[in-house]
């Protein structure tokens, strides 16, 4: 394995990229900033080592989160990138055996993540200088981090072995990691209402085992064993020990599947279905079934003089923006909203006295669900707005037209924001039902719509911004997901350390968080002490204006750039 040329090539290629330098610098900058913020001003340790453990716990959780954010960028596109460059076939034409190629790709792709974890050891060891902390505790944290890097990296490799396009692999990997890191750990957190402790012994054991699959929950149970977020089922091993028992078989299983898939003959990507053009005066049973004006096979009319040609081009060429897929997505959101509100209506009607006080909490939950949906879906729709045309050569055709930079950006921006607005609008009936039972909640509903609308603008602008900066859709999508998930979900982790951070610091972090802002707009009791909505809208609005202006300037540069640049 040491002399495997693929390992050397993968590691050196990753270290030489600009992406690796930025991510490694960001990792070291965040860890150094946390040490500086949490280090005691007088340099003295309190009795029992509480200060040192506080620093270690924050650093450990932060590094787990950053490893989870970096994993898709280096593993999800490892095999799909080879397929896109048509170099995977060349590897199998060499003298290397298929097993050596599979092992080299797996070990080489995980090399950067392991190096990132190793670079964070000095920061993790710094609390030892304060005393009161055992070296074995730091070693245990490093072991969990290394296992997390391999565990999450193998998930990305497994997805990469099943996909043919890098940007799709990155989108799917981010979705899977969100489930593995957050969703499976939700029953163990206090916000779930002690879901893990409800039901019989078998139910508790199943939820405890499932929560142990999350590296975030494993780290919380290791560094904060007395915290409510680390609570587990009595008489069962803590989650961090269960994580070792469960993640190692999972790594071996995913590695075996990747090994088997790499040893199989290479299959070409499935060709896209060709569209059939029919005349507009041709009616058939299928046309009537699809509703004529949504029929994807009908001949399109000419672009009107007041319509943006780039917008029309996006809606007619990008599959994710096709009317039939948008209608399906909107229908799913609308049906989910109606079902959810039907359950709420039955609850309110059955328990009027008890449920009236819960309407505000239900509105907060619906608003948070809308924001999270936009955060998870938005980057997939906006990450390839501009760079996808550069990859396919369509950009060279746009450069030969008379279209201005403003026309191109505005058309791309409208194509990115319209689907997100439709998805958000499909969820609004959920809030309308609540107003039937409690009319005075309408100011909160209005404030929720403000925050949701600003989130749509921000996510669409972030995708446009990174799509104009990078030349590859996979890279732009990865950076869009990283920024949006960091601001929308990962900053909520400060709630786990309310006794570690000052209220001023937590309020400053929440100013950038759309989930916290929508909870404050809904009047959630947990956010009443923070004045978030108006400052959040101002900060996000300013960021949207700046990024949109940079995008226009970048498109202006790209239109005048040589083809080979």
Image (cartoon, grey):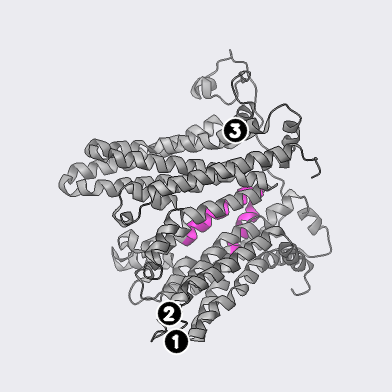
Residue drawn 20% across and 46% down?
A: 356
3D distance between C-alphas at marks 1 and 3: 58 Å
- The percent position of residue 549, horizontal first and vertical second, equals 60, 41
- The percent position of residue 505, horizontal first and vertical second, equals 42, 63
- The percent position of residue 476, horizontal first and vertical second, equals 63, 49
Residue 398 counted in the magenta span: no
**Between 239 and 98, the one nearer to me in the picture:** 239
Residue 176 counted in the magenta span: yes
* Mark 3, residue position: 410
First in sequence: mark 1 vs mark 3: 1
* Mark 1, residue position: 132
First in sequence: mark 2 vs mark 1: 2
Residue drawn 59% across and 30% down?
A: 315
First in sequence: mark 3 vs mark 2: 2
Residues packed near mark 1 inside 10 Å, few (<14), some (14 to 19) or many (20 plus) = some
Magenta: predominant secondary structure element?
helix
User: What stretch of residues is rendered in magenta?
Assistant: 153-181
Vertical placement of residue 227 versus 19, above or below? below
* Mark 2, residue position: 51
Q: Split into 4 quadrants, where in the image is the C terminus?
A: top right
The secondary structure type at the circle numbered 3 is helix
Residue drawn 60% across and 71% down?
A: 117
Cβ atoms under marks 2 and 1 closer than 8 Å: yes
């Amino acid at each position: 394995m040491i002399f495997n040329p693929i390992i050397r090539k993968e590691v050196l290629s990753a270290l030489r990229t600009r992406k690796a330098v930025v991510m490694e610098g960001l990792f070291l900058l965040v860890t150094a900033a946390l040490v500086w913020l949490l280090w005691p001003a007088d340099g003295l340790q309190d009795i029992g080592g509480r200060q040192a453990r506080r620093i270690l716990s924050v650093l450990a959780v932060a590094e787990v989160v950053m490893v989870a954010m970096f994993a898709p960028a280096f593993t999800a596109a490892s095999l799909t990138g080879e397929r896109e460059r048509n170099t995977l076939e060349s590897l199998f034409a060499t003298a290397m055996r298929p097993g050596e190629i599979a092992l080299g790709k797996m070990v080489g792709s995980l090399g950067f993540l392991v190096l990132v974890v190793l670079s964070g050891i000095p920061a993790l060891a710094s609390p030892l200088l304060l005393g009161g902390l055992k070296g074995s505790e730091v070693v245990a944290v490093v072991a969990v981090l290394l296992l997390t890097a391999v565990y999450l990296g193998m998930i990305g490799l497994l997805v990469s072995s099943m996909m043919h396009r890098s940007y799709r692999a990155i989108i799917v990997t981010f979705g899977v990691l969100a489930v593995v890191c957050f969703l499976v750990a939700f029953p163990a957190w206090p916000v779930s209402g002690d879901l893990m402790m409800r039901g019989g012994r078998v139910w508790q054991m199943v939820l405890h085992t499932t929560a142990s699959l999350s590296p975030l929950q494993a780290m919380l149970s290791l560094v904060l064993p007395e915290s409510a977020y680390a609570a587990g089922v009595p008489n069962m091993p803590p989650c961090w020990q269960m994580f070792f028992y469960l993640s190692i078989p999972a790594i071996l299983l995913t590695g075996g599947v990747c090994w088997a898939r790499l040893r199989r003959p290479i299959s070409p990507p499935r060709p896209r279905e060709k569209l059939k053009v029919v005349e507009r005066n041709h009616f058939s049973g299928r046309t009537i079934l699809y509703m004529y004006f949504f029929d994807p096979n009908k001949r399109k009319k000419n672009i009107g003089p007041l319509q943006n040609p780039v917008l029309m081009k996006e809606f007619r060429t990008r599959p994710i923006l096709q009317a039939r897929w948008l209608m399906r997505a909107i229908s799913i959101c609308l049906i989910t909203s109606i079902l959810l509100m039907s359950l709420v209506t039955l609850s309110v009607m059955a328990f009027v006295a008890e449920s009236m006080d819960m309407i505000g909490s239900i509105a907060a939950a619906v608003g948070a669900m809308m924001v999270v949906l936009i955060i998870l879906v938005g980057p997939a729709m906006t990450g390839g707005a501009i760079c996808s045309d550069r990859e396919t050569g369509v950009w060279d055709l746009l450069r030969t037209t008379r279209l201005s930079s403003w026309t191109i950006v505005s058309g791309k921006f409208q194509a990115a924001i319209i689907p997100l607005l439709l998805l958000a609008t499909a969820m609004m009936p959920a809030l309308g039902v609540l107003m039937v039972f409690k009319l005075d909640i309408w100011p909160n509903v209005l404030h929720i719509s403000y925050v949701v609308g600003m989130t749509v603008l921000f996510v669409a602008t972030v995708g446009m911004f990174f799509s104009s900066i990078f030349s590859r859709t996979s890279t732009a999508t990865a950076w869009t997901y990283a920024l949006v998930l960091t601001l929308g979900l990962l900053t909520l982790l400060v709630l786990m350390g309310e006794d570690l951070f000052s209220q001023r610091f937590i309020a400053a972090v929440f100013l950038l968080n759309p989930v916290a802002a929508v909870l404050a707009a809904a009047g959630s009791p947990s956010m009443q002490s923070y004045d978030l909505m108006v400052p959040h809208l101002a900060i996000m609005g300013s960021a949207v204006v700046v990024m949109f202006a940079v995008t226009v300037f970048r498109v202006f540069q790209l239109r005048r750039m040589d083809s080979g640049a």
